[in-house]
Image: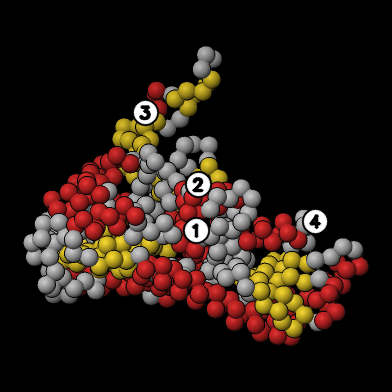
Amino acid sequence: MRKGLPKREEGFSSWYTQIVNKADLADYGPVKGTMVIKPYGFQLWENIKESFDKMIKETGHVNAYFPLFIPKSFLAREAEHVEGFAKECAIVTHTRLKSDEKNGVVVDPESKLEEELIVRPTSETIIWSMYKKWIQSYRDLPILINQWANVVRWEMRTRLFLRTSEFLWQEGHTAHATKEEAEKETLDILGLYQKLAEEYLAIPVITGIKTEAEKFAGAERTYCIEAMMGDKKALQAGTSHDLGQNFAKAFDVKFQTKDNREELVWATSWGVSTRLVGAIILTHGDDKGLRLPPKIAPIQLVIIPIYKTIEQEQLIKDYIQDLVEDWKNHEIRVHEDWTDNTPGFKFNNWEMKGVPLRLEVGPRDIEKNNVVLARRDSGEKVFLSKVEAIKKVPELLINIQENLFSQALQFREKNTHVINKYDELKTIIKQGGFVRCGWDGKASTEAKIKEETKATIRCIPLDEKPKDLKCIYSTSPAKHEVIFAKAY
């Protein structure tokens, strides 16, 4: 265990925060609730971003950018939407400062705006104000636009990556001619989110639909992917919203159909954020630090040369040159650590940073024409000839990716409980884990369970089987099978 890093079981929250710090992922910003994403953390986010960006472009979506500032009146047009975000909005009221002999710099009272501006909490309103200009005919549909941006939600309790006042994300906003097209879009994107989480982040997720109490403000339906973290809590890892015609009504966005009728447009929105970096830490991290899935790791293989003299240093450089060139030609992200730190320090440092593979090489290895590979996922050491190492590294990276997913899936299955008694639910929620059970569909039941246990319905799984189930709380016939858990 790296010095100074608490064991996960002894202090999960402290363990998480220290990993973010010691692995050089992020730091606290000067404004309370904000974070500075450091280069290593930003590389991790960029790899996630590039993976998903490729997916959506392959399915016909394009990127655009919309303003950071939103007129306050725009939010007021969709009542449910403004109600959902009212308490989180940052507001701009003036346009400039001025010098003051007594107080230094002050807000110039003469620069007060006629209408306050909201710093973007999400972009539905400003985007639909533009769609009003862009959409006249069925020929203009569908519009499949995504933007990569920052948003501000004035959070009271913050935690790096998981919940900050400002964060980075993508937000897709699409417009369609029919209800069926919009619904298909939300489910198609949900499938891409599942693919991103499971195939790239190695995080197994449950796909489902949010209850009315938990859905996005302004949506008809909210679909989600829910993941179990290492402390058995749930994390909402992505959401896809069927907005119906709510925003089209609010902004009067209509189109002329093929048979010359005028109809309102159908809408969706969907997003994932830098919270996914937190999900990776919470799912895969251990007592030594991060364990990164190879597909999105900034560095997939780190080389630790072990030498004492300048001659030995040069010998190692010559020895590994063709290896490094070959791996880089195969687009493996390789880093050589030639710093003057001790080998032990380097081992601990790169374990903390979660690099999937470590290659150790010294004069003795060169004499035998060998290298030593250490797996970050299992700690296993693999002794290979130099020739074997060329082919083995890509195979090991694939295996590590699969193993991390398998471990996370086994952990989730072990800690998911199918029950029918409320006392059991209370016990399990207290210990941590997912509870899969019946629910009568009543908001009052959902609220009472939340009040008594602090657990929420994470989703109604798409593969629910409510037949013959009874509600865990009221014992009435179940309308849905749901998953309860405490969540981040």
> Judging from the image, what secondary structure is the residue with disc 2 in?
helix
Determine which residue is flagged by label 1: 281
Q: Residues within 10 Å of mark 1 (few under 14, many from 20)?
A: many
Number of callouts in the render? Answer: 4
> Judging from the image, what secondary structure is the residue with disc 3 in?
strand
Q: Residues within 10 Å of mark 2 (few under 14, many from 20)?
A: few
Determine which residue is flagged by label 4: 340
Q: CA distance from mark 3 to mark 2?
A: 43 Å
Residue 50: x %, y % from top left: 50, 67
Q: CA distance from mark 3 to mark 1?
A: 44 Å
Q: CA distance from mark 2 to mark 1?
A: 13 Å
Toward which corner of the image does residue 189 lie, by quadrant? Answer: bottom left
Q: Residue at image x 55%, y 64%?
A: 291
Name which residue type carries label 1.
Ile
Name which residue type carries label 3.
Lys
> Judging from the image, what secondary structure is the residue with disc 1 in?
helix
Q: Does 431 sit left or right of 342 as displayed?
A: left
Question: Mark 2–mark 1 contact, CB under 8 Å?
Answer: no
Determine which residue is flagged by label 2: 14
Residue 366 in sight:
yes
Determine which residue is flagged by label 3: 112
In the image, residue 280 sits, relative to residue 100, either above or below, namely below
Nearer-N-terminus badge (3/4): 3
Question: Mark 3–mark 2 contact, CB under 8 Å?
Answer: no
Residue furthest top in the image: 102
Q: Residues within 10 Å of mark 3 (few under 14, many from 20)?
A: some
> Judging from the image, what secondary structure is the residue with disc 4 in?
loop
Q: Residue at image x 77%, y 72%?
A: 361
Question: Mark 3–mark 1 contact, CB under 8 Å?
Answer: no
Q: CA distance from mark 1 to mark 4?
A: 29 Å
Residue 366: x %, y % from top left: 83, 77
